[in-house]
């Protein structure tokens, strides 16, 4: 991996705590390339005590950082953004090596991840308070916004860069300190961000990166350490519930980006070719391993067969392989367990009457490759209607009318993203409003941008990331009652 990088200095394997690169007190853990199964790095395994040090140093650094002008913070963050973009290729190679996604997607993620730092570097100049009408003649009611303090972050492996930047960007911009615990599958992308943070002049201790194989222990430290005032998490709903329970003891503020179970609905007045392209982008991005990936594809009766045929033609032409090879559409899945989930959903569907159209098998003798799969005749009693597959598995459900499909689409505990394709204006308006989701894509399969509020309703989470709303997650309101 080192030989592939133009700047090998980006490949850090120690932890970044209090501005120092240090070994882990719990030894090291392996990072493997899912395309080959090879161990590509041994990374510092930090102890809970080391996380406590990072938190304490964060407390000190945060005070000075918050005292800077917004413009001073903005200039440093802007530099961090510039360095990410200047090193886009190396960061993408590191990401593909540890995560598996095709290099083109990894480059895209670096640009996407960096955009949050750019956006919030600009946005922090617009953290504005208010003066409200007084309730008595001598009273002036001032409302100011202040940074929450030290933030603990836990993120998953599917977007090893962007899941961190869209938390760290607004947190640092707001004046908070940030301690990031990256997923143990993908710590190298996070540590590379730490290298660039030092170069950008982000003050020592303000940002720490604490790789650890003990996610639960780090989660406890964040929740039990009274200096940590905010927990931001992206991952499964199951782990989100555990963290919310733990955070209750200190009444800690939490942002939770949890699981999805996105419906993707194709109505009979849709542009079918556009819907197929949208479904490809939405279902197979990152090999189906995103929380906004289409999980259930509902197609209206009259266009069902035509849609299935067009989708199958596109899917059969997709190239599965090592993400570092040119022309790869789909890389490996992250782990063996991820493949087993796809196999489980497929076996469940076919045992209950669904038909396999294409895919349905592992590919090759090494790595965790699985052929993109389509099944038709899928119904609400199958596992995939309730659970996120998180893999290259496209189940096609058939529906008759709008009310029926809205009921089916909303029949889930999740509410992150939903998509539909239709042309009729009245239908577009009604369906957009009726879907119980935090994000709705209309005639598009790609909805993510730093400029929009990303987040879910129901058990998909709490809070929003991105846009001017995203920075509020890291600010507290203070009401100052002034008697004059
Ligand atoms: P995913 O299926 O995306 O890995 P998880 O919710 O299992 O979703 O993991 C998301 C992140 O949460 C990962 O970094 C994982 O290591 C971490 N994690 C898992 N269990 C816990 C826990 N009990 N406390 C804190 N973090 C956890």
Image (spheres, grey):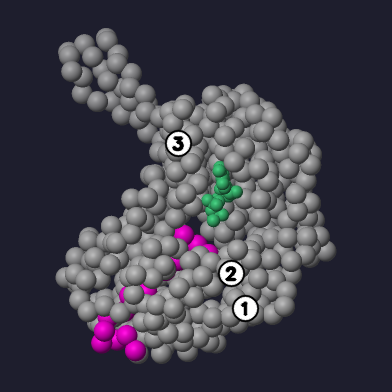
- Tag on residue 362? 1
Q: Earlier in the sequence, mark 1 or mark 2?
A: 2
Residue with the mark numbered 2: 339
Which of the 4 quarters of the picture holds residue 39? bottom right
The residue lying toward the viewer, choosing from 152 and 407, is 407
Task: Name the residue at 78% across, 59% down.
Answer: 40
- Tag on residue 245? 3
Does residue 287 lie above or below 250 as drawn? below
Q: Count neighbours of disc 1 (C-alpha within 10 A) and say few if under 14, some if 14 to 19, many if 20 or more.
A: some
Secondary element at image label 1 = strand
Does residue 378 lie above or below 19 as drawn? below
Q: Position of residue 332 (x, y in %)?
A: 63, 71
Mark 1 vs mark 2, CA separation in Å: 8 Å
Dots 1, 2 in contact, CB < 8 A: yes
175 displayed left or right of 452: right
Task: Name the residue at 73% across, 60% down.
Answer: 32
Q: Count neighbours of disc 3 (C-alpha within 10 A) and say few if under 14, some if 14 to 19, many if 20 or more.
A: few
418 displayed left or right of 10: left
Q: Quadrant of the N terminus?
A: bottom right
Q: Which residues are magenta?
A: 288-305
Q: Earlier in the sequence, mark 3 or mark 1?
A: 3
Which of the 4 quarters of the picture holds residue 31? bottom right
Task: Name the residue at 65% across, 37% down.
Answer: 208
Task: Name the residue at 42% across, 85% down.
Answer: 355
Q: Position of residue 20 (x, y in %)?
A: 75, 35
Q: Is residue 141 magenta?
A: no
Secondary element at image label 2 = helix
Does residue 31 lie above or below 217 as drawn? below
């Amino acid at each position: 991996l080192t030989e592939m990088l133009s700047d090998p200095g980006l490949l850090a394997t120690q932890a970044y705590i209090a501005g120092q690169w240090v070994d882990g007190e719990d030894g090291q853990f392996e990072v493997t390339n899912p395309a080959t199964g090879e161990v590509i790095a041994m990374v510092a395994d930090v102890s809970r005590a080391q996380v406590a040090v990072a938190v304490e140093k964060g407390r000190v650094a945060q005070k000075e950082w918050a005292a800077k002008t917004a413009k001073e913070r903005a200039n440093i963050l802007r530099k961090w953004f510039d360095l990410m973009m200047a090193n886009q290729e190396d960061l993408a190679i590191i990401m593909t090596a540890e995560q598996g996604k095709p290099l083109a997607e990894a480059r895209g993620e670096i640009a996407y991840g960096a955009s949050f730092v750019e956006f919030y570097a600009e946005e922090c100049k617009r953290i504005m308070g208010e003066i409200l009408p007084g309730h008595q003649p001598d009273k002036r009611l001032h409302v100011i916004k202040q940074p929450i303090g030290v933030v603990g972050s836990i993120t998953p492996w599917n977007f090893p860069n962007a899941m961190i930047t869209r938390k760290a960007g607004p947190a640092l911009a707001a004046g908070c300190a940030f301690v990031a615990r990256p997923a143990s599958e993908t710590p190298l992308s996070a540590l590379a961000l730490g290298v660039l943070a030092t170069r950008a002049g982000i003050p020592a201790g303000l940002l720490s990166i604490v790789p650890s194989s003990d996610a639960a222990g780090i989660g406890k430290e964040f929740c039990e350490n009274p200096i940590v005032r905010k927990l931001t998490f992206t991952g499964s709903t199951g782990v989100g519930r555990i963290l919310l329970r733990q955070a209750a003891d200190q009444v800690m503020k939490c942002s939770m980006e949890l699981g999805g179970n996105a419906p993707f609905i194709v109505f009979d007045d849709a542009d079918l070719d556009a819907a197929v392209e949208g479904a490809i982008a939405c279902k197979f991005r990152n090999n189906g391993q995103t929380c906004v990936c289409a999980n259930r594809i509902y197609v209206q009766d009259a266009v069902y067969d035509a849609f299935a045929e067009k989708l199958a033609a596109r899917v059969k032409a997709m190239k599965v392989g090592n993400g570092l090879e040119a022309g790869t559409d789909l890389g490996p899945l992250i782990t063996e367990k991820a493949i087993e989930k796809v196999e489980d959903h497929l076996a469940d569907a076919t045992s209950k009457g669904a038909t396999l159209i294409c895919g349905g098998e592992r590919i090759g003798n090494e790595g965790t490759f699985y052929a993109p799969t389509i099944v038709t005749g899928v119904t609400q009693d199958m596992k995939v209607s309730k659970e996120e597959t998180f893999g290259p598995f496209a189940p096609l459900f058939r529906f008759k009318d709008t009310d029926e499909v809205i009921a089916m689409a909303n029949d889930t505990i999740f509410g992150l993203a939903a998509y539909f394709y239709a042309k009729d204006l009245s239908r577009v308006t009604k369906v957009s409003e009726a879907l119980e989701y935090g994000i709705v894509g209309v005639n598009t399969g790609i909805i993510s941008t730093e400029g929009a509020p990303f987040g879910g309703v129901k058990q998909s989470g709490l809070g929003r990331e991105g846009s001017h709303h995203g920075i509020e997650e890291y600010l507290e309101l203070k009401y100052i009652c002034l008697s004059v």
